[in-house]
Image (cartoon, helix red, strand yellow):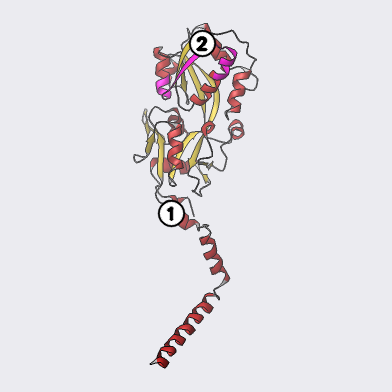
């Protein structure tokens, strides 16, 4: 019996040695592929499968960013005399720029859009039609997803509010816009402080708000008694506040509608790009305007269409 047992052990050892030898003679490309996969460099098809269904993240109705994005990409379609927003019904609707950033950051299959000036390193901005979302490309006209930052106010606005607007459009104000990543005027005039002691209300676009906060801060440094209450509640709400007089200044991150422009004066205080953002784990680098329409209307629902 002992001899038989030893015989079996010997056979097992021989088989094991044979298997090891076979494993060591794999074709080089096969071994290399296994090593690459072990290092996390998945083939594109596997990466697409990991991402799966596209999770569309949009802004709420009334958002100037949404209005500009849907118009520029063709998601807003003409239906006779009317315009219809065809944003995908399954889209996750977020009410602020920060909410879009957070949602995309935490969802590897997510895609959304934000003001370029609010872009940070928690997400990745993709190219659009091969062009990066930068201030230089917006200024040159090469980056097509761009829109104005408008302020609106009543024609009979008081002199102290007028002075704050004068500062916004001054050399100092437009320099702040450029420093924050927007496009300002290059030939603006210098500002002279007046010791303004006004207390005003400003309401509107969540995209314009970060720039407006910087402008108010800089203006207060020159006019310490000035106060401004800023309500970040969307472009449409800002235009309504300016028209109704509940705010001295309304903010809109889009063109004014015809009925709004008939009620108030307006100024473009800067130009901004709309960055299309994806999760940092997403390997997609470039989308066309047609791709964006397909994604945000739900015509295409799988990342595999864009990751080959």
Relative to the observer, which residue lies in front, 84 or 114?
A: 114
Q: Which residues are magenta?
A: 217-238
Label 2: how many residues lie within 10 Å, few (<14), some (14-19) or many (20+)? some
- In terms of image quadrants, where is residue 215? top right
Q: Residue at x 41, y 50 (%)?
A: 302
On residue 50, which mark appears? 1
Q: Circle 1 sits in a helix, a strand or a loop, which is it? A: helix
Say whether residue 81 is left or right of residue 135. Answer: left
The correct choice, above or below, for 10 with respect to 92 in the image is: below
- In terms of image quadrants, where is residue 94? top left
Mark 1 or mark 2: name the one nearer the start of the chain.
1
Relative to the observer, which residue lies in front, 43 or 41?
A: 41
Say whether residue 207 is left or right of residue 53. Answer: right
**Count of labels in the image:** 2
Q: Residue at x 48, y 83 (%)?
A: 13
Q: Is residue 87 visible?
A: no
Label 1: how many residues lie within 10 Å, few (<14), some (14-19) or many (20+)? some
Q: Position of residue 114 (x, y in %)?
A: 48, 34
Q: Which residue is mark 2?
A: 161
The correct choice, above or below, for 150 with respect to 44 in the image is: above
- Residue most toward the front? 2
Q: Position of residue 51 (x, y in %)?
A: 43, 51
- Residue most toward the left? 89
């Amino acid at each position: 019996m002992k001899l038989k047992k030893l015989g079996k052990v010997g056979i097992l050892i021989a088989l094991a040695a044979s298997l090891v030898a076979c494993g060591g003679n794999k074709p080089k490309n096969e071994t290399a592929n296994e090593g690459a996969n072990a290092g996390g460099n998945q083939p594109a098809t596997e990466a697409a499968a990991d991402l799966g269904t596209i999770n569309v993240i949009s802004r709420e109705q009334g958002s100037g960013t949404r209005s500009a994005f849907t118009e520029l990409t063709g998601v807003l379609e003409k239906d006779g005399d009317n315009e219809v927003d065809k944003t995908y019904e399954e889209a996750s609707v977020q009410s602020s720029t920060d909410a879009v950033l957070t949602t995309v950051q935490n969802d590897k299959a997510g895609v959304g859009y934000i003001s370029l000036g609010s872009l940070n390193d928690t997400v990745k901005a993709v190219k659009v039609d091969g062009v990066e979302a930068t201030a230089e490309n917006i200024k040159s006209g090469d980056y097509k997803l761009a829109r104005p930052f408008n302020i609106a106010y009543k024609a009979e606005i008081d002199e102290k509010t007028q002075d704050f607007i004068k500062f916004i459009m001054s050399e100092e104000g437009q320099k702040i816009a450029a420093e924050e990543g927007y496009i300002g005027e290059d030939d603006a005039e210098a500002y002279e402080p007046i010791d303004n002691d006004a207390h005003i209300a400003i309401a509107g676009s969540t995209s314009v708000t970060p720039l407006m906060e910087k402008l108010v801060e800089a203006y207060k440094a020159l006019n310490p008694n000035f106060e401004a209450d800023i309500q970040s509640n969307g472009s449409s709400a800002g235009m309504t506040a300016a028209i109704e007089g509940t705010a001295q200044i309304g903010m809109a991150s889009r063109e004014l509608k015809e009925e709004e422009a008939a009620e108030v004066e307006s100024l473009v205080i800067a130009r901004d790009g709309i960055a299309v953002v994806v999760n940092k784990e997403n390997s997609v680098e470039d989308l066309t305007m047609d791709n964006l329409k397909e994604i945000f209307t739900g015509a295409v629902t799988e990342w595999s269409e864009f990751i080959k």
